[in-house]
Amino acid sequence: MKSNLFILTKVQLKTGLSVQGRGRKNRSALLIFGLIAVAFLPLIIEIVKFLSDAYNALERIGQQGVLLSLSFTISSLVIFLFGIFYVLNIFYFANDVESLLPLPLKPGEILGAKFLVTVFYEYLTGIAFVLPIVAVYGVKSGGGVLFWLYAVLAFLLLPVIPLALASYIILPLMRFTGFAKNKDRFRLVGGIFALVLAFGYSYLNQKFVGSTLTSEGLQDLFLKGNNSLVGIVSRIFPTSRFAAESLVNASNISGLTNMALFFLVCALAFVLFLYLGEALYFQGVMGISETSARRRKLTSDELDKNISSKSVLMTCLLKELRILFRTPVYFLNCVIMNFLYPLFLIFPFLAQSSAGSLMGELGHIINNEKFGGYVLVGAFTLILLVSSNNGITSTAISREGSNLYISKYIPAKYSTQIMAKVLSGVLLSAGGILSLLLISAILFKINAAMMFAILVTGLAGALFTAFVGIMIDIIRPKLNWDNEQKAVKQNFNMLFTALICLAAAGVTIFGVIRLKLGFAETLAAILILYGLLDILMYYLVKTAGVKRFSEIET
Amino acid sequence: MIVLENVSKTYGGTVKAVDNISLTVNNGEIFGFLGPNGAGKTTTIKMITGILSPDSGTITVNGKDIRKEPIEAKKQFGYVPDDPNVFLRLKGIEYLNFMADIYSVSPGDRKQRIENLARRFEMESALGDRIQSYSHGMRQKIVLMGVLIHDPSVWILDEPMMGLDPKSSFILKEMMREHADSGKTVFFSTHVLDVAEKICDRVAIINKGKILFCGRIEEMKEQFKRNESLEKMFLELTENEE
């Protein structure tokens, strides 16, 4: 059993974390990670500063240990929430389940390996929530060797209990109910749930953080006693207290006993998980990949409705949109964000207690003719950023994956097929523009001239981002993927497109502010500049783009 | 009619997948393309269909050069790939309509052909469902229907019988015969030598990128000076190459 477990875990980690390509590609990936790290450096420094202030404040009342239990508890909670999705996706929906089921393996072996792999994934969560706090605590308190040793152990073991808890919920659910029997529908519902969580988080953030995110506020929060959030949360994960206690008391025997206790509880949780898995897993996972179908003969009318004839461009566009809307990963990442982002922007304002007057004030500024140019370029920039981030064109070739060869043998010009993809991007970005216009019309009562200006400049900008995206994806498409997630979420082409458009937006804003352009001048400037850029990009895609596309071999 | 002249293709600079082959597939014949795994069959087919570009040589379909007049050449043939997992999120009917639009099939022909093909391949009740929900054989059938809907004069089929049930396989073979008999072209690759022996007018055997034999099965028997099965001759031919 032991050897099977380890073989499986190794294989799963290799396939899950496989780094594509070698050499040059790897280096560019490293470079990108480096850039991202540098970009986040100021934020990290801020966080460390804040933590160190909080440590000082808490030390004054001898409560600095709270930092550790807070960090362990919150990360346990986060790991638990992520865990529910991970468990469903990795245990039940992963592509390898079908190939593992016929092998002579015990459920416990498959589950054990999948559990360990999930634990590895959760370390990423752990790094974000635990590492900074433990590091600050360790340095500030002058922790010895034992402290760091316990810290590493606690970090490694931390995901076990929340993940086991998530599995205790999911395993019976999948065994005894039809919950999530339809993969696509479940992914959609899950994705929307995640969005709601994000909304909720941003709302709460606006409501509370402002008042408590000072070291004095934090001190207050703890002094007020047991009814605080920490108390409630740590009651859900009482075990994380063992981990915290062992670090706080690293220098004496209580550290060792607490660590031993923590280890014991983790081991028990894992064993219980294996027993539950033996009993419930196979029954729940079998048949999971079946897709429901009606298998009903189409009537003559339905057939007629379905076989209207269209031009090649239209039929390619329709195919593109159908796949975008019907694939949950694409729908959530590429489609729905276009329509929701204005809500994300407006939400924090609405959460403020003085929302009404704030809106009025903002509306005042927005409708002030003096600021017309700035408002227009602001809206334009927003549209540029959102449509360059939707990834519709910047992953359009990648999304074809192993089906790309179809584009090659059908008698449709490459340029037509590429333009259909560009159009799909512009269309959905246009949906985003309309959604922005609608919300600003309701909240800020912007005038018709401004609405029209935002619409036309927005379309010019959306076209530009679509061209940039498709060009980048033609140059370096990511065609080798086994699940759709990888085509979109793990695709740097989206990031490259966003960066280029961010730079373009920066230059545009800078120009408008520097030249102190008014409304009409800004409108004209953007239309002329981006009109020319669009023509240039169109020409580039038609020539170099088509040539490069014809060279892609699958 | 398909003509390949001195066609070569090298992968990654060293491996010659197809090595200077020349072939003519005439109108009115079923041409079988045989060879062991990795012999270069699919690479050759991908070059004929414009999916891969040959390093050298020319390929024409009904006289249209696939590189110089790609769109015209592609209109001449219908292609069934070896992997039937196409556009899984589309419904069967949507896929057929997509293909009909791409090959500009008139609305009248379109409806009549869809109904006719769906009946013959027993796919009537599946057309309204997504291809994702189809079995391997049903996916093979929908791809086949996507080819037949535009009634191409040249059929290029990569392992077309794979996964088909006996009845559909039988119908397909019948259709191939009818198509060739009407003076048009059928070019197909297969591993199933019994099938090749029964229905092919001519065959080519490819191994390690080279054509070892091209002609009628009777000619092969004369060459071997024995009355052996295609299977035995095939094994002998490809063995000797080692």
Image (cartoon, helix red, strand yellow):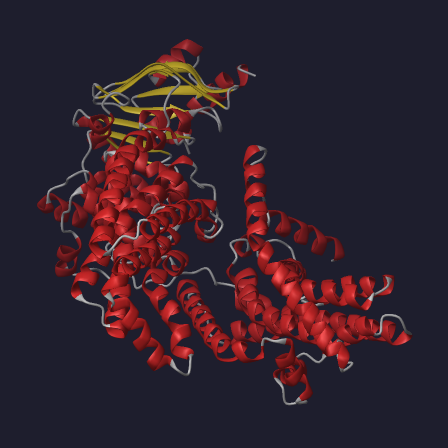
Q: Is residue A518 above or below residue B221?
A: below
Q: How many marks?
A: 0
Left of A170 or right of it: where is A344?
A: left
Front position in the image: A66 or A87: A66
The residue sitting at 16% across, 65% down in the picture is A448
Q: Position of residue A354 (x, y in %)?
A: 39, 82
Question: Toward which corner of the image does residue A407 lie, by quadrant?
Answer: top left
User: Which residue is rendered at x = 57% and y = 62% of the image?
Assistant: A91
Q: In this rendering, would A393 be left or right of A63?
A: left
Name which residue lies at 81% across and 73% down. A248
- Quadrant showing the N terminus of chain B: top left
Taking depth in this image into account, of A337 and B210 the one nearest to the observer is A337
* The quadrant where residue A283 appears: bottom right
What x and y, as percent, mark residue A516? 30, 53
Instruction: Point out the residue furthest to the left here.
Output: B108
**Which x, y percent locates residue B211?**
42, 16
Q: Is residue A321 visible?
A: yes
Residue A377 in the image, given as x and y percentages of width and height: 30, 55
Nearer to us in this view, B26 or B120? B26
- Foreground residue, A376 or A543? A376
Kindly give the residue lying farthest to the right in the view shown. A253
* Residue B83 can be seen in this image: no
Q: Quadrant of the C terminus of chain B?
A: top right
Using residue B203 as the reference point, say whether residue A214 is left or right of it. Answer: right
Q: Residue at x 34, y 66 (%)?
A: A342
